[in-house]
Amino acid sequence: MQVGVQQNPMIELKSFNENNLPLVVDVVVPLWSPSVGDYSFKRFNVEFIVRNNISENKYHFELIDSNSQEFLAAAFFTRKGDPCRVEEWYEKECTRFPEELRRATNMSRVYLQQMDQRTLSFMKDDDIKLSLFVSRHSGSGSQILNQLYPKLKEEGWKNLFLWTDCDCNWSWYNKHGFTLVEEASYEPFSNEQEDYKTYIFKKVL
């Protein structure tokens, strides 16, 4: 965290514009798509994962190029006790797909719920969770977080928690000031050849 560093004047931190949600989904569809279903279902499943990480609070941010107004990155945070309306969205949208495909989304739902609850169990009331951050350009993810760390600290948040897994670049957090709190195996996604690893990290603000 470098509070005193002058920010790029062409970069603007703003509240997240929900119209940019499809752009967030675009970034992660290649990474998080299930192995079943057509592109429409894969995108639905990934949007469910994204929306699961957007809680009902004010902690939704985006980074914009102030000249071109291009959307560069987004970050979403969750406090203990924050509700999420993803289930309302799911019940409305899932009827487009057969039951056998919806089972894949249910696997994602159980996994996300378990990992979210596991992470929240390590947190105190003055800690906050980084639920999701997405970058559309190299370096933009670090830029948005570096701008948000001092803002969160000024509001009184003590520690930033997050969870990730072996499908993501989890080692990035080791290199950017986070401490590993827990490493575990998620049995439903593991097999005889390889454990599916999950990681919970913490950063002092």
Image (cartoon, helix red, strand yellow):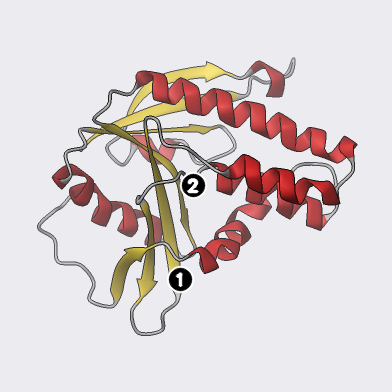
Tell me residue 78's x, y (percent). 39, 39
Give the side of residue 201 with respect to residue 157, left or right: right
- Quadrant in the rendering for residue 64: bottom left
Name which residue lies at 26% across and 52% down: 148
- Quadrant in the rendering for residue 168: top right
Give the side of residue 119 with respect to residue 43, left or right: left
Give the side of residue 153 with respect to residue 193, left or right: left
Tell me residue 70's x, y (percent). 45, 76
Name which residue lies at 33% across and 24% down: 123
Q: Residue 71 carries which label?
A: 1
Name which residue lies at 31% across and 52% down: 145
Tell me residue 136's x, y (percent). 49, 64
| Mark before the other along the chain sequence, 2 or 1 | 2
User: In front: 83, or 42?
Assistant: 83
Q: Please tell me whether residue 16 is drawn above or below residue 51 in the rendered image.
A: below
Q: Residue 170 carries which label?
A: none
Name which residue lies at 65% across and 26% down: 110
Q: Please tell me whether residue 26 is drawn above or below residue 154 in the rendered image.
A: below
Q: Is residue 33 visible?
A: no
Tell me the residue that label 2 is attached to: 54
Q: Are marks 2 and 1 in contact (CB under 8 Å)?
A: no
User: In front: 45, or 34?
Assistant: 45
The kind of residue on which mark 1 rests is Phe
Q: How crowded is mark 1: few (under 14 residues within 10 Å), some or many (20 or more)?
A: many
Q: Please tell me whether residue 136 is drawn above or below residue 181 in the rendered image.
A: below
Q: Please tell me whether residue 117 is drawn above or below residue 56 in the rendered image.
A: above
Tell us which disc is closer to us: 2 or 1: 2
Tell me residue 169's x, y (percent). 50, 41
The kind of residue on which mark 2 rests is Ile
Q: Can residue 4 be seen in this view?
A: yes
- Element marked by disc 2: loop
Q: Residues within 10 Å of mark 2 (few under 14, many from 20)?
A: many
